[in-house]
């Protein structure tokens, strides 16, 4: 399964930037994209591991519930 790199903008606007076969390659590319990203540009650079592009976009749009915060 490939790793997809996306720019996630407000209101769940997704822009596919790249696709990589290995995590190390995807991680390096995402880090360089984050470093080159201007402060004024909206959106975050995200890596998603998925079977295909459609599944990656679906996973990026899902709302995640926060995990437990320490000892309660």
Image (cartoon, grey):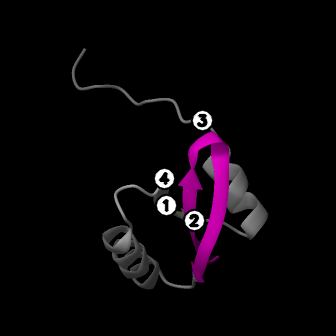
Q: Nearer the viewer, residue 43 or 27?
A: 43
Q: Is label 4 in a helix, a strand or a loop?
A: loop
Residue 61 x, y percent position in the rendering: 66, 45
Q: Nearer the viewer, residue 69 or 20?
A: 20
Answer whether labels 2 and 1 touch (C-beta < 8 Å): yes
Tell me which label, 3 or 4, sits earlier in the chain: 4
Instruction: Give the residue at x 39% y 55%.
Output: 40
Q: Is label 1 in a helix, a strand or a loop?
A: strand
Which part of the image, by quadrant, shows the C terminus?
top left
Tell me which label, 4 or 2, sits earlier in the chain: 2
- Name the residue that disc number 3 marks: 63
Work out whether 68 lies above or below 11.
above
Q: Is label 3 in a helix, a strand or a loop?
A: loop
Instruction: Give the residue at x 42% y 80%.
Output: 29
Main secondary structure along the magenta-highlighted residues: strand
The label nearer to you, 3 versus 4, is: 4
Q: Of the numbered discs in the image, which one, if any, rests on residue 6?
A: 2
State the CA–CA distance, disc 2 to disc 3.
16 Å
- Name the residue that disc number 1 marks: 46
Residue 2 x, y percent position in the rendering: 62, 77
Residue farthest toward the right in the current orientation of the protein: 54
The label nearer to you, 1 versus 4, is: 4
Instruction: Give the residue at x 31% y 71%.
Output: 35
The residue segment tinted magenta is: 1-19
Tell me which label, 3 or 1, sits earlier in the chain: 1
Left or right of residue 9, residue 23 in this image: left
């Amino acid at each position: 399964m490939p790793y997809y790199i996306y720019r996630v903008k407000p209101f769940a606007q997704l822009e596919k930037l790249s696709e990589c076969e290995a995590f190390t390659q995807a991680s390096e590319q995402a880090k360089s994209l984050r470093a080159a990203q201007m402060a004024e540009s909206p959106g975050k650079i995200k890596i998603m591991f998925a079977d295909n592009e459609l599944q990656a976009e679906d996973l990026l749009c899902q709302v995640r519930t926060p995990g437990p915060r320490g000892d309660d």
